[in-house]
Amino acid sequence: MIELYNIHKSFEGKPVLKGVNLKIGQGETLVILGRSGCGKSVTLKIILRLIKQDLGRIVIDGEDTTNYTEDQMLPLRKKIGMLFQGSALFDSMNVKENVAYPLREHLKLPEDEVSQKVAQALSFVELSGAEQTMPSELSGGMKKRVALARAIVLEPRYMFYDEPTTGLDPLTSRKINELINKLKDEYKVGSIVVTHEIANAFKVADRFEVIKDGEILFSGTANELKGSKLKFVQDFIKGGTIENANQ
Amino acid sequence: MKNYIINTAASTVEALYRFFAFHWEVAKRLVRPPYYPKLIWEQMDRVGVDSLPIVVLTSFFTGFVLAFQIGYALMRFGAKLYVGGIVSVSLVRELGPVLISLVFAGRVGAGITAELGSMQVSEQIDAMRALATDPIRKLVMTRFLAAVIMLPILVVVGDLIGILGGMLVSVMNLGLTANFYRTSVVNALVFNDLISGFIKPLIFGGMISIVACYFGLTARGGTKGVGDAVTRTVVVSSVLIFLLDAFITKVLFLMGM
Protein backbone atom coordinates (compact mmCIF):
# COMPACT_ATOMS: atom_id res chain seq x y z
CA MET A 1 0.00 0.00 0.00
CA ILE A 2 1.13 3.56 -0.75
CA GLU A 3 0.14 6.14 1.84
CA LEU A 4 0.56 9.92 1.74
CA TYR A 5 0.03 12.02 4.84
CA ASN A 6 -0.30 15.79 4.88
CA ILE A 7 1.81 16.45 1.77
CA HIS A 8 2.71 20.08 1.14
CA LYS A 9 4.63 21.42 -1.83
CA SER A 10 5.32 24.93 -3.09
CA PHE A 11 7.14 26.17 -6.18
CA GLU A 12 8.84 29.56 -5.88
CA GLY A 13 6.65 30.44 -2.92
CA LYS A 14 3.41 29.43 -4.66
CA PRO A 15 1.69 26.55 -2.84
CA VAL A 16 0.64 23.69 -5.13
CA LEU A 17 -0.25 20.98 -2.60
CA LYS A 18 -1.66 21.92 0.80
CA GLY A 19 -1.98 18.88 3.02
CA VAL A 20 -2.84 16.07 0.62
CA ASN A 21 -3.66 12.63 2.10
CA LEU A 22 -3.98 9.56 -0.13
CA LYS A 23 -3.99 5.78 0.10
CA ILE A 24 -3.75 3.25 -2.69
CA GLY A 25 -3.70 -0.52 -2.29
CA GLN A 26 -2.77 -3.33 -4.69
CA GLY A 27 -5.35 -4.26 -7.28
CA GLU A 28 -7.27 -0.98 -7.15
CA THR A 29 -7.27 2.02 -9.44
CA LEU A 30 -7.42 5.48 -7.96
CA VAL A 31 -8.14 8.37 -10.29
CA ILE A 32 -7.01 11.84 -9.28
CA LEU A 33 -9.09 14.50 -10.98
CA GLY A 34 -8.40 18.18 -11.10
CA ARG A 35 -7.74 21.12 -13.35
CA SER A 36 -4.48 21.44 -15.22
CA GLY A 37 -1.74 22.70 -12.92
CA CYS A 38 -3.53 21.76 -9.69
CA GLY A 39 -0.72 19.44 -8.54
CA LYS A 40 -1.88 16.04 -9.79
CA SER A 41 1.35 15.16 -11.61
CA VAL A 42 3.40 16.67 -8.78
CA THR A 43 1.72 14.18 -6.42
CA LEU A 44 2.93 11.24 -8.51
CA LYS A 45 6.45 12.66 -8.78
CA ILE A 46 6.55 13.22 -5.03
CA ILE A 47 5.70 9.56 -4.35
CA LEU A 48 8.54 8.50 -6.68
CA ARG A 49 10.77 11.14 -5.09
CA LEU A 50 11.45 12.77 -8.45
CA ILE A 51 10.42 15.90 -6.55
CA LYS A 52 10.82 16.29 -2.80
CA GLN A 53 7.86 17.43 -0.76
CA ASP A 54 8.23 20.39 1.61
CA LEU A 55 6.29 18.68 4.36
CA GLY A 56 4.44 15.41 4.95
CA ARG A 57 5.05 11.68 5.16
CA ILE A 58 5.13 8.97 2.50
CA VAL A 59 4.92 5.24 3.24
CA ILE A 60 5.39 2.62 0.50
CA ASP A 61 4.58 -0.98 1.46
CA GLY A 62 5.24 -0.17 5.12
CA GLU A 63 8.55 1.64 4.45
CA ASP A 64 8.62 5.29 5.48
CA THR A 65 10.41 6.93 2.55
CA THR A 66 10.00 10.50 3.79
CA ASN A 67 13.71 11.09 4.33
CA TYR A 68 15.07 8.55 1.86
CA THR A 69 18.05 9.54 -0.27
CA GLU A 70 18.20 9.05 -4.04
CA ASP A 71 20.18 5.82 -3.53
CA GLN A 72 17.64 4.47 -1.02
CA MET A 73 14.79 5.22 -3.41
CA LEU A 74 16.27 3.24 -6.33
CA PRO A 75 15.10 -0.23 -5.20
CA LEU A 76 11.64 1.11 -4.32
CA ARG A 77 11.25 2.66 -7.77
CA LYS A 78 11.50 -0.82 -9.27
CA LYS A 79 8.16 -1.55 -7.60
CA ILE A 80 6.49 1.37 -9.35
CA GLY A 81 6.04 1.88 -13.08
CA MET A 82 5.30 5.33 -14.42
CA LEU A 83 3.71 6.34 -17.69
CA PHE A 84 4.72 9.94 -18.34
CA GLN A 85 2.42 12.46 -19.97
CA GLY A 86 4.73 12.91 -22.94
CA SER A 87 5.73 9.22 -22.91
CA ALA A 88 9.38 10.21 -22.21
CA LEU A 89 10.82 7.52 -24.48
CA PHE A 90 14.60 7.70 -24.93
CA ASP A 91 14.71 9.19 -28.39
CA SER A 92 18.21 7.92 -29.18
CA MET A 93 17.07 4.31 -28.67
CA ASN A 94 14.69 2.20 -30.75
CA VAL A 95 11.56 0.58 -29.30
CA LYS A 96 13.34 -2.61 -28.28
CA GLU A 97 16.16 -0.74 -26.54
CA ASN A 98 13.62 1.43 -24.71
CA VAL A 99 11.63 -1.53 -23.43
CA ALA A 100 14.77 -3.52 -22.66
CA TYR A 101 16.33 -0.60 -20.76
CA PRO A 102 15.09 -1.53 -17.25
CA LEU A 103 15.83 -5.22 -17.89
CA ARG A 104 19.43 -4.51 -18.89
CA GLU A 105 19.88 -2.09 -16.00
CA HIS A 106 18.57 -4.30 -13.23
CA LEU A 107 18.53 -7.94 -14.31
CA LYS A 108 21.55 -9.75 -15.63
CA LEU A 109 19.60 -11.72 -18.21
CA PRO A 110 20.96 -13.38 -21.35
CA GLU A 111 20.17 -11.39 -24.47
CA ASP A 112 17.68 -13.94 -25.85
CA GLU A 113 15.68 -13.74 -22.60
CA VAL A 114 15.71 -9.93 -22.82
CA SER A 115 14.37 -10.17 -26.38
CA GLN A 116 11.69 -12.59 -25.23
CA LYS A 117 10.53 -10.33 -22.39
CA VAL A 118 10.52 -7.30 -24.69
CA ALA A 119 8.41 -9.23 -27.20
CA GLN A 120 5.97 -10.22 -24.41
CA ALA A 121 5.65 -6.63 -23.18
CA LEU A 122 5.11 -5.34 -26.73
CA SER A 123 2.56 -8.06 -27.35
CA PHE A 124 0.71 -6.96 -24.18
CA VAL A 125 0.37 -3.43 -25.59
CA GLU A 126 -0.40 -4.88 -29.06
CA LEU A 127 2.69 -3.55 -30.75
CA SER A 128 4.39 -6.80 -31.70
CA GLY A 129 7.00 -6.37 -34.41
CA ALA A 130 7.74 -2.72 -33.63
CA GLU A 131 11.10 -3.51 -32.00
CA GLN A 132 13.33 -1.74 -34.52
CA THR A 133 11.17 1.39 -34.89
CA MET A 134 12.54 4.68 -33.56
CA PRO A 135 10.31 6.77 -31.25
CA SER A 136 10.25 9.61 -33.80
CA GLU A 137 8.48 7.28 -36.24
CA LEU A 138 5.65 6.44 -33.81
CA SER A 139 2.28 8.17 -33.37
CA GLY A 140 1.35 9.65 -29.98
CA GLY A 141 -0.78 6.63 -29.06
CA MET A 142 1.93 4.17 -30.07
CA LYS A 143 4.50 6.09 -28.02
CA LYS A 144 2.22 5.81 -24.98
CA ARG A 145 1.90 2.08 -25.52
CA VAL A 146 5.67 1.61 -25.88
CA ALA A 147 6.16 3.69 -22.72
CA LEU A 148 3.61 1.46 -21.00
CA ALA A 149 5.48 -1.65 -22.16
CA ARG A 150 8.71 -0.18 -20.75
CA ALA A 151 6.99 0.66 -17.46
CA ILE A 152 5.54 -2.83 -16.96
CA VAL A 153 8.45 -4.94 -18.16
CA LEU A 154 9.86 -5.23 -14.62
CA GLU A 155 6.39 -6.30 -13.42
CA PRO A 156 5.81 -3.46 -10.94
CA ARG A 157 3.34 -3.69 -8.06
CA TYR A 158 2.06 -0.19 -8.73
CA MET A 159 1.53 1.85 -11.90
CA PHE A 160 1.25 5.62 -12.15
CA TYR A 161 -0.37 7.09 -15.25
CA ASP A 162 0.11 10.80 -15.90
CA GLU A 163 -2.60 11.95 -18.31
CA PRO A 164 -2.59 8.61 -20.17
CA THR A 165 -5.25 9.52 -22.74
CA THR A 166 -4.70 13.25 -23.21
CA GLY A 167 -4.38 14.19 -26.86
CA LEU A 168 -5.25 10.73 -28.14
CA ASP A 169 -8.10 9.82 -30.48
CA PRO A 170 -11.11 7.96 -28.93
CA LEU A 171 -10.06 4.54 -30.24
CA THR A 172 -6.51 4.84 -28.92
CA SER A 173 -7.85 6.19 -25.62
CA ARG A 174 -10.09 3.14 -25.34
CA LYS A 175 -7.10 0.90 -26.02
CA ILE A 176 -5.11 2.59 -23.24
CA ASN A 177 -8.06 2.28 -20.84
CA GLU A 178 -8.33 -1.41 -21.66
CA LEU A 179 -4.63 -1.88 -20.93
CA ILE A 180 -4.97 -0.12 -17.57
CA ASN A 181 -7.86 -2.41 -16.63
CA LYS A 182 -6.03 -5.48 -17.96
CA LEU A 183 -3.03 -4.73 -15.73
CA LYS A 184 -5.30 -4.40 -12.72
CA ASP A 185 -7.35 -7.53 -13.45
CA GLU A 186 -4.54 -9.86 -14.57
CA TYR A 187 -1.62 -8.69 -12.45
CA LYS A 188 -3.38 -7.04 -9.46
CA VAL A 189 -1.42 -3.85 -10.08
CA GLY A 190 -2.40 -0.89 -7.90
CA SER A 191 -2.77 2.18 -10.10
CA ILE A 192 -2.99 5.92 -9.77
CA VAL A 193 -4.34 7.65 -12.83
CA VAL A 194 -3.98 11.40 -13.05
CA THR A 195 -6.33 12.98 -15.57
CA HIS A 196 -8.81 15.71 -16.29
CA GLU A 197 -10.64 13.63 -18.88
CA ILE A 198 -13.74 12.59 -17.00
CA ALA A 199 -15.13 10.11 -19.57
CA ASN A 200 -11.95 8.06 -19.62
CA ALA A 201 -11.63 8.32 -15.84
CA PHE A 202 -14.96 6.55 -15.30
CA LYS A 203 -13.79 3.64 -17.46
CA VAL A 204 -10.86 2.77 -15.20
CA ALA A 205 -11.57 4.13 -11.71
CA ASP A 206 -12.41 2.22 -8.55
CA ARG A 207 -12.10 5.38 -6.47
CA PHE A 208 -11.79 9.09 -7.17
CA GLU A 209 -9.96 11.93 -5.46
CA VAL A 210 -10.67 15.44 -6.69
CA ILE A 211 -8.01 18.09 -6.05
CA LYS A 212 -8.87 21.77 -5.97
CA ASP A 213 -6.50 24.54 -4.94
CA GLY A 214 -3.97 22.04 -3.64
CA GLU A 215 -6.40 20.21 -1.35
CA ILE A 216 -8.47 17.06 -1.67
CA LEU A 217 -11.98 18.34 -2.23
CA PHE A 218 -13.71 15.01 -2.78
CA SER A 219 -12.91 11.38 -2.10
CA GLY A 220 -15.18 8.46 -3.03
CA THR A 221 -16.46 5.97 -5.59
CA ALA A 222 -17.80 6.68 -9.07
CA ASN A 223 -21.40 6.68 -7.84
CA GLU A 224 -20.55 8.98 -4.93
CA LEU A 225 -18.78 11.31 -7.38
CA LYS A 226 -21.83 11.42 -9.64
CA GLY A 227 -24.06 12.13 -6.63
CA SER A 228 -21.81 14.77 -5.12
CA LYS A 229 -23.45 18.10 -4.32
CA LEU A 230 -20.19 20.00 -4.68
CA LYS A 231 -20.52 22.50 -7.50
CA PHE A 232 -16.86 22.11 -8.56
CA VAL A 233 -17.34 18.35 -8.85
CA GLN A 234 -20.59 18.67 -10.76
CA ASP A 235 -19.09 21.27 -13.07
CA PHE A 236 -16.12 19.00 -13.62
CA ILE A 237 -18.31 16.02 -14.49
CA LYS A 238 -20.46 18.06 -16.83
CA GLY A 239 -17.44 19.85 -18.28
CA GLY A 240 -18.90 23.16 -17.11
CA THR A 241 -17.23 26.44 -16.32
CA ILE A 242 -14.93 25.29 -13.58
CA GLU A 243 -13.14 28.63 -13.46
CA ASN A 244 -16.19 30.17 -11.81
CA ALA A 245 -17.08 27.23 -9.65
CA ASN A 246 -16.94 27.60 -5.92
CA GLN A 247 -18.00 25.01 -3.44
CA MET B 1 17.34 48.83 -5.10
CA LYS B 2 18.40 47.39 -1.76
CA ASN B 3 15.96 44.48 -2.17
CA TYR B 4 17.21 43.88 -5.70
CA ILE B 5 20.80 43.60 -4.46
CA ILE B 6 19.80 41.27 -1.61
CA ASN B 7 17.72 39.05 -3.93
CA THR B 8 20.49 38.92 -6.54
CA ALA B 9 23.08 38.05 -3.89
CA ALA B 10 20.81 35.36 -2.41
CA SER B 11 20.08 33.76 -5.79
CA THR B 12 23.80 33.86 -6.70
CA VAL B 13 24.73 32.12 -3.45
CA GLU B 14 22.00 29.53 -4.02
CA ALA B 15 23.15 28.91 -7.60
CA LEU B 16 26.75 28.48 -6.43
CA TYR B 17 25.61 26.11 -3.68
CA ARG B 18 23.69 23.97 -6.21
CA PHE B 19 26.66 24.02 -8.59
CA PHE B 20 29.11 22.81 -5.94
CA ALA B 21 26.58 20.33 -4.50
CA PHE B 22 26.45 18.83 -8.01
CA HIS B 23 30.26 18.48 -7.92
CA TRP B 24 29.90 16.62 -4.64
CA GLU B 25 27.29 14.27 -6.12
CA VAL B 26 29.68 13.41 -8.95
CA ALA B 27 32.66 13.04 -6.60
CA LYS B 28 30.74 10.59 -4.37
CA ARG B 29 30.06 8.35 -7.35
CA LEU B 30 33.69 8.40 -8.50
CA VAL B 31 34.71 6.12 -5.65
CA ARG B 32 31.89 3.60 -6.07
CA PRO B 33 31.10 1.30 -9.03
CA PRO B 34 29.38 0.71 -11.45
CA TYR B 35 31.26 2.85 -14.01
CA TYR B 36 29.63 1.76 -17.30
CA PRO B 37 32.92 1.17 -19.21
CA LYS B 38 31.09 0.58 -22.51
CA LEU B 39 29.39 3.98 -22.26
CA ILE B 40 32.67 5.66 -21.26
CA TRP B 41 34.28 4.14 -24.37
CA GLU B 42 31.43 5.45 -26.55
CA GLN B 43 31.78 8.91 -25.03
CA MET B 44 35.56 8.87 -25.53
CA ASP B 45 34.88 8.31 -29.20
CA ARG B 46 32.30 11.11 -29.33
CA VAL B 47 34.16 13.74 -27.31
CA GLY B 48 37.68 12.77 -28.33
CA VAL B 49 37.98 11.12 -31.73
CA ASP B 50 35.21 13.21 -33.27
CA SER B 51 36.94 16.40 -32.04
CA LEU B 52 40.22 15.55 -33.77
CA PRO B 53 39.58 17.37 -37.09
CA ILE B 54 38.79 20.73 -35.46
CA VAL B 55 41.65 20.34 -32.97
CA VAL B 56 44.11 19.56 -35.77
CA LEU B 57 42.90 22.53 -37.81
CA THR B 58 43.01 24.98 -34.87
CA SER B 59 46.42 23.81 -33.67
CA PHE B 60 48.03 23.80 -37.09
CA PHE B 61 47.07 27.38 -37.83
CA THR B 62 47.92 28.54 -34.31
CA GLY B 63 51.46 27.17 -34.67
CA PHE B 64 51.63 28.52 -38.21
CA VAL B 65 50.64 32.09 -37.25
CA LEU B 66 52.65 32.03 -34.05
CA ALA B 67 55.84 31.13 -35.92
CA PHE B 68 55.14 33.85 -38.47
CA GLN B 69 54.64 36.59 -35.87
CA ILE B 70 57.48 35.55 -33.62
CA GLY B 71 59.79 34.90 -36.57
CA TYR B 72 59.33 38.35 -38.06
CA ALA B 73 59.65 40.04 -34.66
CA LEU B 74 62.86 38.13 -33.88
CA MET B 75 64.36 38.73 -37.33
CA ARG B 76 64.76 42.43 -36.40
CA PHE B 77 67.14 41.38 -33.65
CA GLY B 78 68.76 38.60 -35.64
CA ALA B 79 67.27 36.05 -33.27
CA LYS B 80 65.05 34.00 -35.59
CA LEU B 81 66.96 30.88 -34.56
CA TYR B 82 64.91 30.85 -31.37
CA VAL B 83 61.56 30.50 -33.20
CA GLY B 84 61.29 26.73 -32.65
CA GLY B 85 61.91 27.00 -28.92
CA ILE B 86 59.52 29.90 -28.37
CA VAL B 87 56.74 28.36 -30.49
CA SER B 88 57.00 24.98 -28.78
CA VAL B 89 57.15 26.30 -25.21
CA SER B 90 54.27 28.74 -25.86
CA LEU B 91 52.17 25.99 -27.38
CA VAL B 92 52.91 23.27 -24.85
CA ARG B 93 52.66 25.40 -21.70
CA GLU B 94 49.89 27.80 -22.62
CA LEU B 95 48.33 28.11 -26.04
CA GLY B 96 47.70 24.42 -26.68
CA PRO B 97 45.85 23.70 -23.42
CA VAL B 98 43.87 26.96 -23.46
CA LEU B 99 42.91 27.15 -27.13
CA ILE B 100 42.08 23.47 -27.49
CA SER B 101 40.05 23.59 -24.26
CA LEU B 102 38.12 26.58 -25.63
CA VAL B 103 37.40 24.62 -28.81
CA PHE B 104 36.44 21.62 -26.66
CA ALA B 105 34.06 23.76 -24.57
CA GLY B 106 32.43 25.07 -27.74
CA ARG B 107 32.09 21.71 -29.44
CA VAL B 108 31.79 19.08 -26.72
CA GLY B 109 30.48 21.19 -23.81
CA ALA B 110 27.73 22.73 -25.92
CA GLY B 111 26.84 19.30 -27.32
CA ILE B 112 26.57 17.70 -23.88
CA THR B 113 24.36 20.51 -22.57
CA ALA B 114 22.10 20.37 -25.62
CA GLU B 115 21.72 16.60 -25.32
CA LEU B 116 21.09 16.46 -21.58
CA GLY B 117 18.96 19.62 -21.70
CA SER B 118 16.70 18.08 -24.35
CA MET B 119 16.41 14.94 -22.24
CA GLN B 120 15.57 17.06 -19.21
CA VAL B 121 12.80 19.10 -20.81
CA SER B 122 11.24 16.01 -22.44
CA GLU B 123 11.14 14.18 -19.05
CA GLN B 124 13.64 11.54 -20.22
CA ILE B 125 15.81 12.26 -17.17
CA ASP B 126 12.78 11.79 -14.90
CA ALA B 127 11.96 8.58 -16.78
CA MET B 128 15.48 7.34 -16.19
CA ARG B 129 15.14 8.03 -12.45
CA ALA B 130 11.66 6.48 -12.36
CA LEU B 131 13.16 3.35 -13.95
CA ALA B 132 15.46 3.18 -10.93
CA THR B 133 18.65 4.28 -12.69
CA ASP B 134 20.92 7.09 -11.63
CA PRO B 135 21.34 9.76 -14.36
CA ILE B 136 24.42 11.22 -12.66
CA ARG B 137 26.17 7.88 -12.80
CA LYS B 138 24.96 6.96 -16.26
CA LEU B 139 25.12 10.31 -18.05
CA VAL B 140 27.42 12.60 -16.06
CA MET B 141 30.12 10.21 -14.83
CA THR B 142 30.59 8.67 -18.27
CA ARG B 143 31.01 12.08 -19.91
CA PHE B 144 33.22 13.36 -17.09
CA LEU B 145 35.64 10.43 -17.31
CA ALA B 146 35.68 10.53 -21.11
CA ALA B 147 36.51 14.26 -21.10
CA VAL B 148 39.21 13.89 -18.43
CA ILE B 149 40.87 11.13 -20.47
CA MET B 150 40.45 12.60 -23.95
CA LEU B 151 41.16 16.33 -23.55
CA PRO B 152 44.82 15.81 -22.47
CA ILE B 153 45.27 13.44 -25.43
CA LEU B 154 43.75 16.00 -27.79
CA VAL B 155 46.06 18.66 -26.37
CA VAL B 156 49.14 16.47 -26.90
CA VAL B 157 48.06 15.83 -30.50
CA GLY B 158 47.27 19.54 -30.95
CA ASP B 159 50.69 20.58 -29.56
CA LEU B 160 52.47 18.30 -32.01
CA ILE B 161 50.42 19.58 -34.95
CA GLY B 162 50.99 23.20 -33.84
CA ILE B 163 54.74 22.62 -33.66
CA LEU B 164 54.57 21.11 -37.16
CA GLY B 165 52.70 24.21 -38.38
CA GLY B 166 55.47 26.34 -36.89
CA MET B 167 58.06 24.21 -38.65
CA LEU B 168 56.37 24.75 -42.00
CA VAL B 169 56.67 28.53 -41.63
CA SER B 170 60.23 28.30 -40.29
CA VAL B 171 61.36 26.25 -43.27
CA MET B 172 59.38 28.01 -45.99
CA ASN B 173 59.54 31.63 -44.83
CA LEU B 174 62.28 32.06 -42.26
CA GLY B 175 64.99 30.07 -43.98
CA LEU B 176 65.57 27.57 -41.17
CA THR B 177 66.11 23.87 -41.80
CA ALA B 178 63.66 21.29 -40.51
CA ASN B 179 66.44 19.61 -38.59
CA PHE B 180 67.50 22.84 -36.89
CA TYR B 181 63.87 23.61 -35.97
CA ARG B 182 63.40 20.12 -34.52
CA THR B 183 66.62 20.42 -32.47
CA SER B 184 65.63 23.82 -31.10
CA VAL B 185 62.23 22.43 -30.09
CA VAL B 186 63.76 19.44 -28.32
CA ASN B 187 66.35 21.63 -26.57
CA ALA B 188 63.80 24.22 -25.45
CA LEU B 189 61.21 21.88 -23.94
CA VAL B 190 61.87 20.56 -20.47
CA PHE B 191 59.96 18.03 -18.38
CA ASN B 192 58.16 20.75 -16.39
CA ASP B 193 56.72 22.23 -19.60
CA LEU B 194 55.21 18.86 -20.45
CA ILE B 195 53.78 18.41 -16.95
CA SER B 196 52.29 21.90 -17.02
CA GLY B 197 50.82 21.25 -20.46
CA PHE B 198 49.29 17.98 -19.29
CA ILE B 199 47.85 19.06 -15.92
CA LYS B 200 45.87 21.95 -17.38
CA PRO B 201 43.76 19.98 -19.88
CA LEU B 202 43.18 17.30 -17.26
CA ILE B 203 41.53 19.90 -15.01
CA PHE B 204 39.86 21.78 -17.87
CA GLY B 205 38.36 18.54 -19.22
CA GLY B 206 36.77 17.73 -15.88
CA MET B 207 35.54 21.28 -15.42
CA ILE B 208 34.01 21.59 -18.92
CA SER B 209 32.16 18.28 -18.66
CA ILE B 210 30.77 19.06 -15.19
CA VAL B 211 29.65 22.56 -16.22
CA ALA B 212 28.05 21.17 -19.39
CA CYS B 213 26.22 18.38 -17.55
CA TYR B 214 25.09 20.71 -14.76
CA PHE B 215 23.55 23.26 -17.11
CA GLY B 216 22.02 20.46 -19.21
CA LEU B 217 20.38 18.73 -16.25
CA THR B 218 19.07 22.02 -14.84
CA ALA B 219 17.67 23.28 -18.17
CA ARG B 220 14.06 24.45 -17.87
CA GLY B 221 11.52 25.97 -20.21
CA GLY B 222 11.55 23.95 -23.44
CA THR B 223 13.77 24.62 -26.43
CA LYS B 224 14.52 28.20 -25.37
CA GLY B 225 15.67 26.92 -21.99
CA VAL B 226 17.98 24.42 -23.71
CA GLY B 227 19.41 27.21 -25.90
CA ASP B 228 20.02 29.39 -22.85
CA ALA B 229 21.69 26.48 -21.06
CA VAL B 230 24.03 25.89 -24.01
CA THR B 231 25.00 29.57 -24.03
CA ARG B 232 25.66 29.48 -20.28
CA THR B 233 27.85 26.39 -20.69
CA VAL B 234 30.05 28.00 -23.34
CA VAL B 235 30.34 31.31 -21.46
CA VAL B 236 30.97 29.81 -18.00
CA SER B 237 33.41 27.18 -19.34
CA SER B 238 35.37 29.79 -21.30
CA VAL B 239 35.62 32.15 -18.34
CA LEU B 240 36.60 29.30 -16.02
CA ILE B 241 39.29 28.13 -18.47
CA PHE B 242 40.99 31.53 -18.23
CA LEU B 243 40.53 31.80 -14.45
CA LEU B 244 41.78 28.28 -13.79
CA ASP B 245 44.63 28.77 -16.24
CA ALA B 246 45.85 31.81 -14.32
CA PHE B 247 45.46 29.96 -11.02
CA ILE B 248 47.21 26.76 -12.16
CA THR B 249 50.02 28.74 -13.81
CA LYS B 250 50.61 30.65 -10.56
CA VAL B 251 50.56 27.47 -8.47
CA LEU B 252 52.96 25.70 -10.85
CA PHE B 253 55.35 28.67 -10.74
CA LEU B 254 55.25 28.64 -6.94
CA MET B 255 56.08 24.94 -7.09
CA GLY B 256 59.03 25.73 -9.31
CA MET B 257 57.42 24.33 -12.46
Image: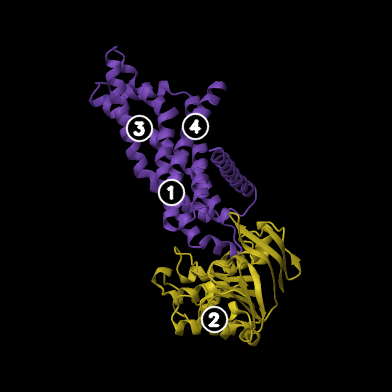
Chain colours: A yellow, B purple
Looking at numbered disc 1 in the image, what kind of residue is underneath it?
Val
Q: Position of residue B208 (x, y in %)?
A: 49, 42
Write down the residue under mark 2. Answer: A198
| Residue A157 shows up from this direction | no
Badge 1: how crowded within 10 Å, few (<14), some, or many (20+)? many
Q: Which mark is residue B230?
A: 1
Q: CA distance from mark 1 to mark 4?
A: 20 Å
Please name the residue that numbered disc 4 is placed on.
B243
Q: Tell me the distance, in whole angstroms, between the alpha carbons under discs 1 and 3.
A: 29 Å
Host chain of mark 2: A
Q: Nearer the viewer, residue A237 or B241?
A: A237
Instruction: Tell me the kind of residue under disc 3.
Output: Gly
Q: Residues within 10 Å of mark 4 (few under 14, many from 20)?
A: few
| Distance CA(mark 3)–CA(mark 4) | 24 Å
Residue B161 appears in which quarter of the rendering?
A: top left
For the C terminus of chain A, give its image quadrant. Answer: bottom right
Tell me which label, 3 or 4, sits earlier in the chain: 3
Three-letter amino acid code at disc 2?
Ile
Q: Which residue lies under the disc numbered 3?
A: B162
Element type at mark 4: helix
Visible in this render: residue B107? yes
Give the Cα distance between marks 2 and 4: 58 Å
